[in-house]
Image (spheres, rainbow, N blue to C red):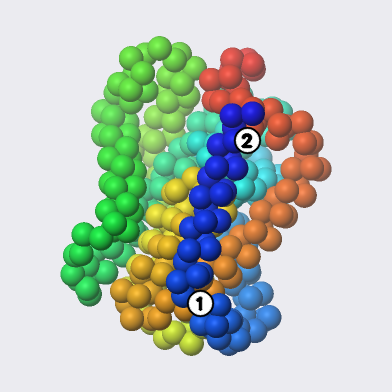
Amino acid sequence: MKKIIFFLALLLIGIVLFYWVIKNIGWQEIRKAFTVLTCWQGVGIFGLTLLAALVGTWKWKELLRAEDVRISFTTLIRYYLGSLTITFFFPQIILGGEVFRGYLLREKSSVPGIKGIASALTDRVLETTIFLIVIFIGVFYLFLRIGFHPTKMTIIFGAIFLFFVLITILFYFKGFKRESLVRFITGGKSSQLLTIEKEMFAFLKPQKLVMAKIFGLNILKVSIMLLRSWFLMGFLEKNIGIMPATTILGFSYVAFLIPIPAAIGSHEAAQVFVFNSLGLGAGAAPVFTMVIRAVEFITALIGAVILFRLGISLVKNTLSQGIDNFVNHYDV
């Protein structure tokens, strides 16, 4: 019951924020921006979204292969899309998509639970590192353009960004020194999390050539997402350069770090701030976010169909269990 209340509370916050943004801009401005989009342009944006998912699956496959786990791409793409559904609709479940990927590997592909979860968590850490770099570049460019103004929005998004930067730096610092971050945070009380962390360190060995490949694939995925933002801005008749597009993408990542379902409201607020700051007009910002949300919603629905085919009981178990409960329930 608490989880449902928490989910509904976050959703309500997002809806209120969305309504506030739209009310301040006005439906007329948004409708005007929508009229320049065509169906085929929407299909192109959706195609780039699917391409990014394919690259995401590819790098996950490379991580698994580095630990001698060989699973077909067609199998992994189903698991990957299924996890995107959980991440999109239930972001308040911390690392829910990654735990679910490990769950599927254990249940459907006979991969040890610890190794499966560790592969998905490692994938998330490495991908988040690239996201943080994009956010930093985007924010730095924005401040060069407009200067630093300590508004409430700047402080909120800055605090979120700083939190994830510190966690990521701490993880890499501890990882490369082979020191336990879990033990540092929990005092070593969770043996299951310590085991998962040990597996993650195995994936993160600096001498492995696979690490360079994973970072390359992460850059490729981000490049596709950057291209998606740039194309969509062009479709909205906003001709911008690569740096403004990077700023827009960076603030999209910040918005999705906030655990509101489908980033409703938070994404609009972030992009209205960016669009206004870059002189692009606030009316186009909600259109941009709604198109992005629409294509990602369709992707999440595809994942939902896959979840039902895989077995809804898997989803229920994943949503009701944390990492520790998952590991306790299965043999490693």
Residue 4: mark in rendering: 2
Instruction: Determine the secondary structure under disc 1.
Output: loop
Indicate the position of residue 72 as horizontal and vertical percent values: 68, 45
Please report the residue visible at 66 percent of the width from the left and 74 percent of the height from the top. 43
Indicate the position of residue 132 as horizontal and vertical percent values: 34, 52
Indicate the position of residue 204 as horizontal and vertical percent values: 39, 36
**Whether residue 111 can be seen here:** no
Instruction: Determine the secondary structure under disc 2.
Output: helix
The quadrant the N terminus occupies is top right
At label 2, counting other C-alpha atoms closer than 10 Å, the crowd grade (few under 14, some 14-19, many 20 or more) is few
Please report the residue visible at 58 percent of the width from the left and 63 percent of the height from the top. 293
- Foreground pick, 58 / 8: 8
Vertical placement of residue 186 versus 133, above or below: above
Residue 8: quarter of image: top right
Using the numbered discs, state the Cα–Cα distance from disc 2 to disc 1 in whole angstroms.
Answer: 32 Å
Please report the residue visible at 54 percent of the width from the left and 74 percent of the height from the top. 287
Q: Give the label, 2 or 1, closer to the camera.
A: 1
Vertical placement of residue 314 versus 301, above or below: above
Residue designated by label 1:
26
Please report the residue visible at 58 percent of the width from the left and 82 percent of the height from the top. 31
> As drawn, is 68 to the left or to the right of 25?
right
Q: What residue type is labelled 2?
A: Ile
